[in-house]
Amino acid sequence: MAAIIITKDTELMQRVIDEIKTCFDPEIPVDVWEMGLIYELELNDDKELTITMTLTSPNCPAAESLPAEVETKCSQVPGIKSTHLKLTFEPTWTKEMMSEVAQLELGFM
């Protein structure tokens, strides 16, 4: 499942995605973007970013740190005015949401 991206500023959004790709679940050697944990990115005309993401499970040991890391790193991307992260568990994350890169890295393909 690919993330839904809503923006007119594709260059700034690419910088956001590049920053998200530096965030890793400490137990999994794949970044959260390739894991499919980012469900939606919305950047409005005022450069306010909303991130909708999930975790591999509600009991994920990184539940305290990973969403905060994603939000903090994205808020530091030059050009982003503000960042708001929404954590959701709908739909439930499954390994099929991972990119082919992630599935290969983790031995699912």
Image: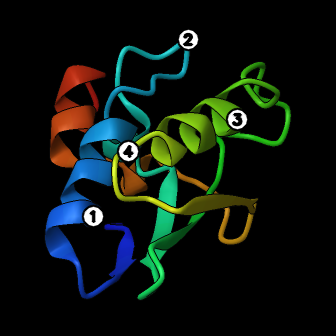
Q: Quadrant of the C terminus?
A: top left
Badge 4 marks a residue whose secondary structure is: loop
Which quadrant holds residue 43?
Answer: bottom left
Q: Nearer the viewer, mark 2 or mark 4?
A: 4
Determine crowd level at label 3: few under 14, some 14-19, many 20+ residues with C-alpha closer than 10 A: few
| Residue that numbered label 4 is attached to | 77
| Residue that numbered label 1 is attached to | 13
Is disc 3 in contact with disc 4, using a CB cutoff of under 8 Å? no
Question: Could one spot residue 84 in this view of the protein?
Answer: yes
Q: Quadrant of the N terminus?
A: bottom left
Which of the two discs, 3 and 4, labels the residue nearer the N terminus? 3
Badge 2 marks a residue whose secondary structure is: loop
Q: Residue at x 53, y 52 (%)?
A: 94
Badge 3 marks a residue whose secondary structure is: helix
Badge 1 marks a residue whose secondary structure is: helix
Q: Using the image, determine if residue 43 lies above or below residue 1.
A: below
Q: Nearer the viewer, mark 3 or mark 2?
A: 3
Determine crowd level at label 4: few under 14, some 14-19, many 20+ residues with C-alpha closer than 10 A: some
> Disc 2 residue type?
Glu
The Cα–Cα distance between marks 4 and 1, rounded to whole angstroms, is 10 Å
Which quadrant holds residue 41?
Answer: bottom left
| Residue 27 marker | 2
> Disc 4 residue type?
Val
Which of the two discs, 1 and 3, labels the residue nearer the N terminus? 1
The Cα–Cα distance between marks 1 and 2, rounded to whole angstroms, is 27 Å
- Image check: 58 left or right of 57? right
Q: In x, y percent, where is residue 29? A: 37, 14
Q: Nearer the viewer, mark 4 or mark 1?
A: 4
The Cα–Cα distance between marks 3 and 4, rounded to whole angstroms, is 15 Å
Which of the two discs, 4 and 1, labels the residue nearer the N terminus? 1
The Cα–Cα distance between marks 2 and 4, rounded to whole angstroms, is 26 Å
